[in-house]
Image (spheres, rainbow, N blue to C red):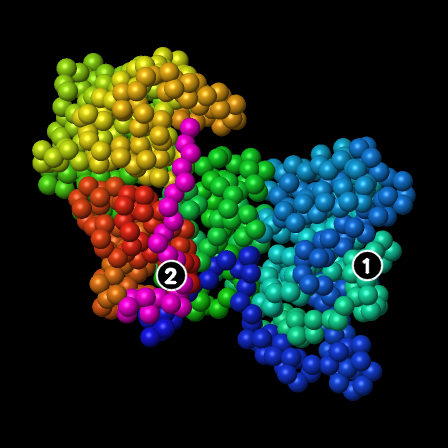
Amino acid sequence: MSSIEMVSSLSEVYLDNNATTPVLPVAAAAAMHAMQSSFGNPSSSHATGIKAKAELEVTRSLARKLIGASSGDIVFTSGATEGIQTSIVSALLAARSNGKVGADTLLLYGSTEHKAVPESLKHWNQVLQVNATIQAIPVDKNGIVDYDFLRKTLPQAVMVCTMAANNETGVKQDLVALETLIRSVNPDVYWMVDCVQALGKMTLDIANTSIDYAPFSGHKLYAPKGIGFLYVRDGAPYQPFIAGGGQESGLRSGTENLPGIAALHAIFSELAKSNGSAFYDEATLWQYRQQLLDALRTVFPSLVLNSDKPYIVPTTINFSVPGFYSKDIMDLFDAAGIRVSSGSACSSKVPTSFVLDAMGLEDWRSQGAIRLSFGPAMTTQECEQACQRIRKLADVVCKHCLVLTDATPTLELHAQGLIQLKHEALCSYIIICADTRQAVVIDPVLPLASRIANIVLGQGLELVAVIDTHQHQDHQSARCALLMLAGLVEQKNKVDELGWPLQQNTLVAGNYRLEKLNTPGHTPEAISILLYKEQQLEAAFVGDVILPGGIGRTDLEGGSMVALADSIRLLAKQLGPDCLLLSSHDYGQGFFTTFSQACAEQPLLAELLQELPMEHWQAELRAQAIKLQQVSTYYCGLVEVSYADATDVILPENLSAFLQQEPNTKVIDVREPHEQSAGALSLYLPNDVEILELPLSKLADALINHTLQQQQRLLLVCRSGNRSLVACKVLSRMGFKQVYNLKGGTALLS
C-alpha cells in the first residue's frame, strides 16, 4: 500500500489564490492541446507553425481588449517578475542615457509593493551604475499611497512604481487620481503599475492612461506558472531583456511558450464572455467575501480586518485575531485542510508583515496577519464548502481554550500535567492537576499571557500561584497582567517580589508539590523551583542558572560568578544527573536538559561539579560575558549546542514499507492539540497504526511520566516535518536511539 493510498479523503479548501491559483480546466485542456496537437513553432513558415502563430496573435489581441490597450506593445513573458525586470532596466537605461544619474535622481516605489519591485530597483540601479536614490512612498492606514509625498518627490524622480491591487491586503490604488498627480508634476517620469492582482478583479482601461509599463502574471489567474505578459506604452523606452532569435518582434527573444499562451487564450476568452463565463461578477465576489467573513467570525468573534471597503478588491480578506500569531492560525487551518497564508507567499518566513508595518498598524496585527484570498472563478458550492469547513473550527478553538466561550469547560487530554509554552526563546510553564483542577504558572511572559489566561479560565482552574524564577532583565514579567486577565487581584502583602507566598517554602497544587530553592548568581534574587509529583522529584525550573546548551550570564547588575557556581553545585546535589532542568530561555530549540546532558555538552560545567579550582571557570565566564556584550541582541546566556540528528528521515513514498518492517513502531503526532483536533493524523495512516498525540508543549511531561521509552522505535510527524525534526533532535539528545522523522510531514501525504 502506498502512502497516497493510505490517505482518507480530507478535501482541500484552497483559499490562497493571491499566491497562485489552480489551472482552470479549459486552460489546462488548451495547454494540453497545444502540446499534443498545435505544437508548432510560431517562427516556422509551414502550416503547423502558421497555426501556432495565429494562436499567439489571437491571444495577444484578447489581452489588448481585456486591459483596454488599443495601442502599445503586448509582450509575452515568463511572468510578472520578468516583466518587472524588463520595465526597470528599460527605464533606468533611458534615464542614464539622458544623464539622470547620481544621488539627486530618485527611484520611487510604494512601500507596500511586492518585494520583486524594490529588490529589482536596488539590483539594476547598482548593476547599471545609475546610483540613484531609491525611496519608498509611504502609505496611510488604509494602504493608499501618500499623495503629498509624491508631490514633493516626483520632480526629482525618473521612475515611479505603484500597484493596481496589493497582493497581501487587496488594497487598490486610484489609478486615475494617481495619473493626474504624476503627470501634472512630472510628465516625463516613467510609470510602472504592477497589475498582477488586478485582472479579473477590477476594471482596467490602460489605453486611456499614461502608464508606461504594466506586468501581468498567468498563474495568479488560473493559467499555468511560467507565462505572463507585459504592456508597454507607445513611446515608452524599451530594452529587450532577452536577446536571441528576435521573437516577439525582437522585444523578447526565445521560442514562445505556446502551451502557456494557449492557456491564457482560454482564460481571456472566459473573461470576455458576457454570459456563461467561469468568472463571476463583482457583486457575487463581494457576496462570497461576506459569507467567508461571517464564517471566520463564528470562529474568531474578535477578528479585526486589516483592510476593508471601499479600498480593496473583493477577493482578499486580511485579518488578525488578538492573542494569536499568524503561525497559530495557519497551523489550525492547515490541519483542517484549509489553505491560507500569513501574507505574501514570498515572505512566508518573515514573522511580521512589512505591508501592515508600512500601513502603521499595531505590532500584534502585523505579527498575526492572515491572508485569505479566493479567485474570481470560485463557485457558490466552493464558497459554501469553505464556509462550512471554517465554521467547524469553532468547536476546536473552544475545546482548546484558544477562544473563550460560555461553553461548559472540560479538562481535555492535554490540559493537564506540565505544559511548556514557548514564544521565540522565551519559555513559560503551567502545572495542572487534573484531580483538583488547580494550576501553577511559572515564568509567564507577556506574549503568552492571553493564551495562559484562556487555559486557566477556559478549563475553570483555580490559579494557586503565578511565580517568576527571577526578575528578568530582557523582558517584563506577565505575572500582574496574567492575574488581571484571570480576574484575580494580587495580594502583594502575601507574596514576595517573585510571587512566592511569604513565609512558605512549599506550594501544593493537588498531586504536585513545589519547593523553593535560592539559586542566585544570574541575578541576586533568583530561585529554582523543584517539582514533585506524589513525593517523587520529577523536574526543576531553574530560570537562567542553566540553559539547554548553556550557562546563565553573570555580568548583569547583581550577578556573581561565585554565587552562580554555588547555586549550580547545590542544584546538582539536590537533583541528581537525570532530573529534567527547565529553563526560562531556550535559544537553541533544546526544550530542556539534565545535568548529565549539560556536562556532556559543556566541559566547563563538568569541571565545576568536580570541585576543580575556580580560575578556569571564572575566565570562561568572563570570555562569555565579552561575547554577549558584543552582540546586538540581548541573551541571558551563551548557548552553543550541536544537536544529534534524527536516526533517519523517512520519505513519504517509503512510509508504508517502514511501517510494515516494524509493526510495533509508535507514531508520534507532535502537532499542537488544536491541530490534532482539526485534522486527525489517522486520516493519513493505515487503521492499525498506533498513534500517540504528543504535542511539543507536552514533551517534557511525557518524559516525566515515562510515556515514551528509550528503546521504542518512534516515528515523529507534524505538518511540515520541521517541528517533528526538532523533537527528534531533542529526544536523540535525551538518549533515544530509534527516532525517525517523516520528511515533509502531513503536507506531503495530503
* Residue in the image at 81% along x and 59% along y: 240
Residue 177 on image: x %, y %: 72, 46
User: How many numbered badges does the structure rendering display?
Assistant: 2
Q: Residue 487's image quarter? A: top left
Magenta residues, as a range?
638-661
- In the image, residue 53 above or below residue 467: below
In this view, the mark in front (2 or 1): 2
- In the image, residue 551 above or below residue 176: above
Question: Which residue is the site of mark 1?
Answer: 240
Residue 428 on image: x %, y %: 30, 33
Magenta stretch contains residue 656: yes
Question: Which residue is the site of mark 2?
Answer: 650
**Residue 394 visible, this orientation:** no
Q: CA distance from mark 2 to mark 1?
A: 47 Å
Please tell me whether mark 2 sits on a helix, a strand or a loop.
strand
Q: Amino acid at mark 2?
A: Ile
Magenta stretch contains residue 42: no
Position of 682 with respect to 333 (left or right) is left
Tags 2 and 1 touching, CB below 8 Å: no
Image quadrant where one finds the N terminus = bottom left
* Residue in the image at 66% along x and 66% along y: 227
